[in-house]
Amino acid sequence: MKPKYNGLFLATLTALHLTGCGGSSGNSAPITEERPDPAPIVFSHLSIKAMEQNKCGNLPVMANVVFHQDNGTFISSQMTQVDGTLESDIPTNAQHVSFVYSSETGTGEKFLQVQTVLNIQHGFEADAIVFKNYDTCGCNTIDYDLETLRAQVPDAHLYGASVDPIVLNTAPDSVSLCTDEQQQLLYTRFEETRKGAILDTSTPSTITLSDAQFMAQGTVLDFGDHTFEPRELITLSSYFGNAMVYNEHVNETRYNHTSYQDDNRLLIFKDLDTISYLSTTRLEEATAFGVSVSTNSYAINKVNEEGQVVGAPHIINDAALTHGYQTLAESLANESSTDVAVINFSEADHRINAVTLTLNWKDAQQGTAQWQFITDGNDTIPDLNFGDIIPQDKVTPLNVSMDVTLLALNTELEFDVLREVMIEVQESFEKRVESQLYDGAAIFTITAKPL
């Protein structure tokens, strides 16, 4: 399955330079790593569980599992069971596997999701292959009764029960909030004291608030000597179990405004047993020849109990990165090639230990389609055939766009193991925490799409 790109990604190179990538790296051939001759093919095992996920939770699904030869030729396919699981021997001539899931929402919208894993001849196991559930799950209407709290602490401010802070001495008797979270963190502030509580919002209900509920002391984050970059955004997210209970964003203008110093909402509540991560995001955007290109550079850090954050360095947006993208773009635009893409970011940041490529498009037969690969950053993706699962002559992609994500994750795992962990941890936040992959990770994403 090889979508036609109509020169989209070559045009992207011009826009990519405008986002700040450091200069052309010339027309020299890309540097490739010497790979050893492949070991003799062994009869290996595949073990997976497929599920779809949205904010309501996870559900097992029946997905197609397609085996491909080294050159992409279709070999055979199987389907996961009703509980989402599949235990299977990998065909002896199989090199790659794709997980294919087609779904339709209650409103009739069609979606196709494909995840391809290359070089699985020695086996592949994942507790969870996660697909997106595009059905909306609605929200729970929570009515917060403020009368008791207002009488007890009339001069305090309440955060989390509405979009804006509530000044209790002028507050109504109750406020309503429709939340799609299962748990929610609320806190009060009076002068320098901040006290928080986690409330159950899993079902529609009326919750009477009182000062006795707010027992956990808040700790304001310590940034040290952090200097904001242009267009940088800071995000603090706190989780209780698998539920995100708090999410706050701040940019330089807001953070340095005099009114924000007293109202600083970048804080944690260690007594509530929440896990918090702080990320810094640097965004650049440009357009050229009808192509919109954006780059997002992320650095993700776990916040310790004292509210301290050690900043992980961002992946540098430079000529070496542009060279890797140029190699990819030229291979994608080469319609005479037997390969879909050539990925080679071996010259970029030495910390990078995985690269994902995601192609997105609209299709007359399949609806909204997404096809993702996880690679080690130096891979050739063949023209993969899916047999009757996705007939080649039925793929008519429109408005193809692409995301390339470079990941410098906190691990020394070999890539084959890292790839399985990366796939598995999408199942839940608790798994992501346990993996420690994102404790000091740097991620750089390039998104290219037609205007």
Image (cartoon, grey):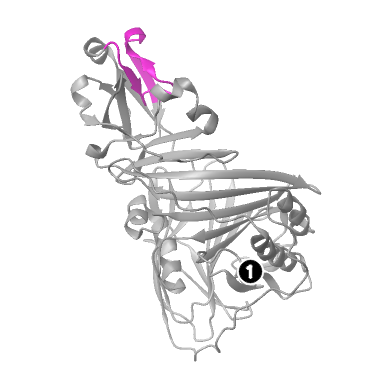
Is label 1 in a helix, a strand or a loop? Answer: strand
Residue found farthest to the left: 212
119 relative to 148, above or below: below
- Taking depth in this image into account, of 210 and 397 the one nearest to the observer is 210
Please tell me in which quadrant of the rendered image residue 396 appears: bottom right
Residue 227 counted in the magenta span: no
Q: Is residue 130 visible?
A: yes
Please tell me in which quadrant of the rendered image residue 216 appears: top left
Q: Position of residue 109 (x, y in %)?
A: 59, 45
The crowding category of the residue bearing disc 1, from other C-alpha atoms within 10 Å (few below 14, some 14 to 19, many at least 20), is: many
112 relative to 261, above or below: below
Q: Is residue 60 visible?
A: no
Q: Position of residue 67 (x, y in %)?
A: 53, 76
- Taking depth in this image into account, of 224 and 437 the one nearest to the observer is 224
279 relative to 381, above or below: above
Q: Residue drawn 29% across and 46% down?
A: 241
Please report the bounds of the magenta region as a residue range: 154-177
Which residue corresponds to mark 1? 343
Residue type pointed to by label 1: Ile
Residue found farthest to the right: 289
Residue 170 counted in the magenta span: yes
Residue found farthest to the front: 225
Please tell me in which quadrant of the rendered image residue 325 appears: bottom right
- Taking depth in this image into account, of 327 and 366 the one nearest to the observer is 327
Quadrant where the N terminus sits is: bottom right
Q: Position of residue 13 (x, y in %)?
A: 74, 56
Question: How many numbered dots are placed on residues in this image?
Answer: 1
205 relative to 292, above or below: above
Q: Is residue 191 left or right of residue 379?
A: left
Q: Residue drawn 34% across and 43% down?
A: 308
Q: Is residue 428 left or right of residue 113?
A: left
